[in-house]
Image: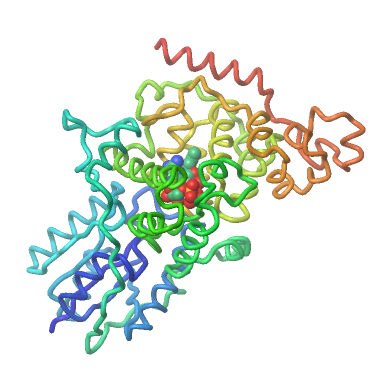
Amino acid sequence: MTPVIVWFRRDLRLADNPALSAAAEAGPVCPVYIHDPDADGDWRPGAASRWWRHHALASLDESLRGHGLRLVIRRGPALETLRALVRETGASAVHWNRLYDPAPVARDRTVKQALQADGIAVHSHKAALLHEPWTVKTGQGSDYRAFTPFWRAARRGGEPDAPLPVPELAAPTTLPTGEPLTTLGLLPRIRWDGGLAGRWRPGEAGARERLAHFTRHALGDYGRARDYPGEPGTSGLSPHLHHGGISPRQIWSAVRNADDGHGEAAEAFLAEIGWREFAHHVLFHHPDLPDAPLNPRFAAFPWRADPGDRLLRAWQAGRTGFPIVDAGMHELWATGWMHNRVRMIAGSLLVKNLRLPWQAGERWFWDTLVDADLASNSLGWQWVAGSGADAAPYFRIFNPVRQGERFDPEGDYVARWLPALAALPPRHRHAPWAAPEGVLRDAGVRLGRDYPRPVVDLKASREEALAAFERIKRG
Ligand code: FAD
């Protein structure tokens, strides 16, 4: 039997992998990964994503070896590389799972047409999403801009199909040669990744483990705990979903099979999987979402001049003087992840109080998040900026002190990520500048030395932001 090529991309798993299952039915499998960062256009994977990708590929290779196979790693433009592999193996077909970001969509279209013209069968499959972006439409046939009706329409089709098991895999007589994973240079040259390695286990087994832990220990209280960054209340599945160590269908099925799988908490959690779907659908229909405001009025927004990027750098380094924001930026730097509530607060401070463009925050997250995802990141930033689909109204400006007091009432999260403030009594941890001199002294905190003073005045910057918004609203 002639071999069948499976082109792995962001679906680095054996279970519930429709491309792999279909290929395995058709013949011996040649599993391939092609390193071609140019194919992502302006959005080459950032440093934290590359770190994850390296380890997820290593894990996939190990799993394949357990089935008498190995991952063939090549580098170069996809079409040329696939053509070479077809020549070397005599493969009659290529299978892959679809991606929905603009650059891969365009690339895949070209690759598909060219291979078909060569006489090779090409099969693409749905794996990354529960619903194809072209199938969820309004009555008028357009795409949705608001989440609630989108999710209602998406769910009308009923529950997703059951996930696929790991298929029986047969190896071809010989597999083509590949490059060692290390030559792709995905790992950082300067080793800053200790915190990532301590927190995450990239790959299919790590994803399975995290999902099992979540459904057993956190799902039941998700509706409440998901908003508290100091508690382990969310799943931590976002990087696994992004890199494809797990599929949304597997998550859905595990939730339904859990003890609390049909309650309110489960519905709240599945709605977040829905937000991920929504983000991908919006990006598919609006490919300039990562760069341009969905609401064109925001193109004229008067951002603040920031000579030398002083404010941007303070934000990136977690030195704004607003503890909940700085704690989040430290969590991000140390672990490649930040809690969703803190992403919203930190984003709001950047875009509204510092009045710096959301694209600057988006780029920073792109490089530092292990779950950096073009759809969810762009939608998240445009949500914060008020310019996106179903976005927060611009005039709703998060107050980082009140948000901190509400969602980190004991200041545990702040104390964990900002040890300089850990000795402050909890009620002063969210606004150390307002603490009495004696309290600061007792806690060993000298403002401006151990922890910065606020880089902006919250009230004045809020008013300036609202005035700037008034100008574009009228314009
Ligand atoms: P859980 O609460 O356990 O949610 C389960 C899953 O649902 C997540 O893994 C994720 O896939 C999905 N999800 C949850 N919330 C959202 C959301 N608001 N939008 C889209 N999907 C969601 N998420 C990313 O995956 N990649 C990003 O690059 C990203 N950038 C963001 C930027 C900003 C400014 C904001 C406000 C949000 C961003 N998010 C992003 C969404 C959200 O913060 C993360 O998905 C979530 O924090 C991941 O943690 P979790 O897996 O524990 O989430």
Task: Give the percent coordinates (x, y) of residue 33.
Answer: 32, 69
Horizontal placement of 427 versus 348: left or right? right
Task: Give the percent coordinates (x, y) of residue 11.
Answer: 34, 63
Q: Is residue 367 shown to the viewer in this render?
A: no
Instruction: State which quarter of the image contains the N terminus.
Output: bottom left
Compared with 158, 406 (above or below) is above
Compared with 337, 91 (above or below) is below
Q: Nearer the viewer, residue 314 or 60?
A: 60
Horizontal placement of 384 versus 92: left or right? right
Task: Give the percent coordinates (x, y) of residue 412.
Answer: 71, 45
Give residue 451's quadrant in the image.
top right
Compared with 90, 391 (above or below) is above
Q: Nearer the viewer, residue 111 or 406?
A: 406
Q: Nearer the viewer, residue 428 or 7?
A: 428
Instruction: State which quarter of the image contains the C terminus.
Output: top left
Give residue 296's quadrant in the image.
top left
Task: Give the percent coordinates (x, y) of residue 58.
Answer: 44, 74
At x 51%, y 59%, the residue is 216
Q: Is residue 197 shown to the viewer in this render?
A: yes
